[in-house]
Amino acid sequence: MRINTTFRMILEQQEAWADKMGIGYEKSSDTDKEAYTYALADNLYLRNLSSRTLDEYNAGRGKELDSKMRALYSSSALVVNVFEYWRQANRISEVARACGAPAGINDMAFERRHKIGNLGTSHLDIEFSGEKVKPFAIEAKFMEPHQVTKRTQRNHTNMDKYLAQAKLWQRLDKCQELAVEILEQEGKKTRYEYLDAPQLIKHILGLSYHYNPNGFTLLYLWFDCATEEARKHNQEINRFHDYIKCEVDFRTMTYHELYKSIRALPAVDERYLGYIGSRYFVLSPAGK
């Protein structure tokens, strides 16, 4: 795994946090095995996950609890550290509103899966739901956009098998056009160097298959910082949004914006705010 300056900067900040807290972690010259805590609990604010959260992650494809969530730079650990507090406090509706979801949300699922016909399965980081409101799905990113430099599209995006099923693309003409472009550029340098556009299209297909294109919201939640790579990532997010916004309710938010909204909520545990603030938001984007 090659890493750029943004990844290295935030990794070093995470290691500094762990050192300050006296948390032990593995160090290796093999960078994709670097900075894994010895115990999963050491990488989590609440240390112990609820039984439902454990079940949801154990049922997921990524085997997050086995190893990935122990990484100091783990995206799933960041998701859990921000959102699990609200589940255990029975305040899901409040954090959903902080994300921009409508009133009426009363449930939340981690690692929500949606089958795309018989072709594959979309795995979302979070999905909020409630009676008489559209599902509000979240795809969340921490370090992933910065783990590879000079990215090319993955060699196996599977866009060909999805494009072969015309019924999947009903009322998704712009998404289909983008999928065709991705397939044509597969294995080459593309317009999306940092944003995983194929993954987002797959999420849209999974959500559309179950709820129809107008029946859901998809939020792209990402970790911003004052670097050139982050600026380019943001440009690609905006390009993707502008291309598909006429047919999908696709939104974007940074973790810094979410943290600001959470801090404005009433009666939030100061220990929780202090943990995620000191761990993740020391390096803030300029002006935020």
Image (cartoon, helix red, strand yellow):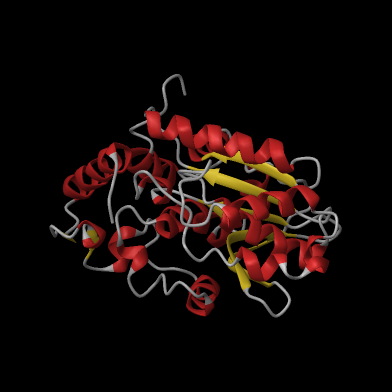
| Residue at 57% from the left image edge and 60% from the top image edge | 87
Toward the viewer: 97 or 33? 33
Residue at 21% x, 67% y is 38
Q: Quadrant of residue 119?
A: bottom right
Who's the residue at 52% across and 51% down the image? 196
Classify 228 as above or below 211: above
Identify the image quadrant of the N terminus. bottom left
Q: Position of residue 176 (x, y in %)?
A: 73, 54
Pick the residue in front: 150 or 199.
150
The residue most toward the top is: 287
Image position of 269 (left or right of 208): left
* Image x and y of residue 39, in percent: 26, 68
Return the x and y of residue 283 as percentages of the image width and height.
34, 32
Relative vertical location of residue 230 with respect to residue 62 in this rendering, above or below: above
**In the displayed structure image, the side of residue 38 where residue 279 appears, left or right:** right
Q: Position of residue 27 (x, y in %)?
A: 14, 58
Identify the residue shown where x is 59% and y is 59%: 126
In the displayed structure, does residue 216 sit left or right of residue 88?
Answer: right
Is residue 269 among what the camera can see? yes
Say whether residue 265 is visible: no
